[in-house]
Structures are given as C-alpha cells and as structure tokens.
Amino acid sequence: MRNMVKSRIFFGTLMTIFFAAVVLFDGWLDGSLSASAPDGRVQGTILCILVALLVAGGQQELGRLLPIVGLRSFSLVTAVCSALFATSWYWPQLVPIRLGLYLAFVAAGSVMAFFLYQAICYGTSGVIANCGANCFSVFYLGGLGSLVLAVRIEFGVWALLMFIFVVKSADIGAYTVGSLFGRHKFSPRISPGKTWEGMAGAIVFSVLVASIFAASCGIMPVWLAVLFGLVFAFLGQLGDLAESMIKRDVEQKDSGRKVPGFGGILDIVDSPLVTAPFAYLFFMINEFAVGV
C-alpha cells in the first residue's frame, strides 16, 4: 500500500509539473503570463491542443468500456465531437462566430453523426441505447472539458493553475491520508476505498494550495481562497465518484493502464471535468466582486 501511495505521489507530481510547464509556456507565448507583456488576440493555443488530445483519449477509453455492458461505441465519431466541444472557447478567437452558435452547431452535428453512424453500422438495433450512451460520453468529456479552456481564456493562466492544482491536490490528499489512516467509509456503495479521513486530507491539501495561490498571485483574497479550497475539495471528490459509478457499472477498477498509480486518462481528468463549470462560475463571481 505504501509503495502504491509513493507511486501515485511521484507520478502525480510529474504530471502536475508537466501540466504547469505547458500552461506557463502557453501563457508566455500569448502574452497572458504577466501584465508587463501585451495579451495576444488568440489565447491558449497549446492548452487547446492538450485538452483536445485528452478528451479524445478519454473517448477511446470509454469506447472500450461501453461494449462490456452491451453498448456499441462510436469511438472515432465521439473523439472528434468531444474535441470540437472541448475547444469551443478557442475558435471564436480565430473566426467571427458566436460561441452559442458554435455550440449549437456542434451539438446538432454530433447528434446527426450518431444517427448516421448507427444507421450505417448497426441499423435499428439498439438505437436509443447506443446513441444515448455516445451522446452522454461527448457531453461528459467534451462539454465539461470546454469549461477548462474557458477558465484559461476568460480568467488567465494563474486562475487555471489555481483551479487545477487545488482539485488535484485534493485528490492527492484524499488518496494519501485515506490510504494511510482511513477507517470510516465515505461512499461504500460507489467507492469503498474513499473515507472521511481521506476527505479531511483533501480539505487540508486543497485549502493550503488555494491559500498559497491567493497570497502569491493576488487572484482573490485569502479568506475567499480558503472557501475555494473547501468547496473544491468536496466537488473534486464528487467528480471522482461520478467516474467511479461508470467503472463500477462495467466492473472495472481503472479506466486504463496508461499512467502508473492512476490508471487511465479518465482516472486523471475525472475531478477537473466535473468541477470546471463551478470553477468558471466561482472566478466569474470573484471577478465581478473585485470589479464592484
């Protein structure tokens, strides 16, 4: 168990460093890293590519899980549709199109693509189940993933890093403390490994990281950062539980084996996906309050 904890912390740290390096380099390229450089017209290009790759990879993992419960996977179609959804905040910077109109066309195009793929490959067998499952996968990965890029483009590099670091530090805190000291089950029906002790670890880690970001970057007052850390410690664990429900339905421990100590891409992005809309809302309210 201790070796597993060390492995998770080690690879989690490596991924965090890599992600931070990508985001900081991306911000340096488009001028959003500091106030001293003028902001470029197009923001978040490298992050856009990374998000598209992650959601497409996540779709491949979901595509391997769906047949276990008797559903057909439209992996290629869902990967493309998810990438288009996840990058929705990026394209209006390049072409004169309203974000709402873009989202409407991608949503409509995705549904039509599902029906067409179903008709060509499977006919009328399992139409509702197959199209429904693939539609869910696109909105889960692509729809929620789009808000990650939205935080970056709307609120900047440091807001995105604060959000991701707080959520992932909550994951690491929950896993570390829960593995070493966990006794009281948090959600035994969905994820038997989660404990209230782990939740306490998540809160401590996330509040600490949020406070450091607030004090060093001036994103928000420290007292508000404490609230941010507390809220997102719980929300992050709920995001992890959402993915656990999928894995328990297909009776799989992990979504894949790409990352030692973690599993697959879905095991890594589950908590940022579900918390991204709340992060966008939180930063929007914070920006409004500061402006007032």
Image: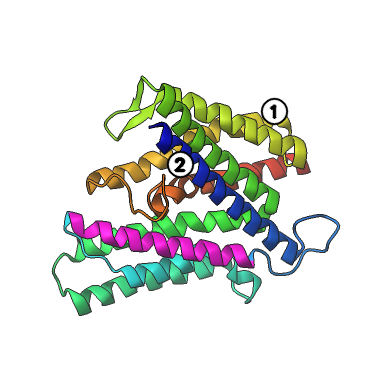
Q: Nearer the viewer, residue 119 or 42?
A: 42
Q: Is residue 215 above or below residue 98?
A: above
Residues under numbered marks 1 and 2 in contact, where contact means CB atoms less than 8 Å apart: no
Residue 118 in percent (x, y) is at 23, 73
Which residue is painted at 36% across and 43% down in the image? 242
- In the figure, residue 60 lies in which quadrant? bottom left
- In the figure, residue 135 lies in which quadrant? bottom left
What span is colored magenta in the figure? 45-68
**Residue 58 falls within the magenta-colored stretch:** yes
Residue 17 in percent (x, y) is at 61, 50
Give the numbered dot on residue 223: 1
Q: Is residue 172 left or right of residue 194?
A: right
Q: Nearer the viewer, residue 183 or 270?
A: 183
Point out the frontmost of discs 1 and 2.
2
Main SS, magenta residues: helix
Give the numbered dot on residue 7: 2
The quarter of the rendered structure image containing the N terminus is top left
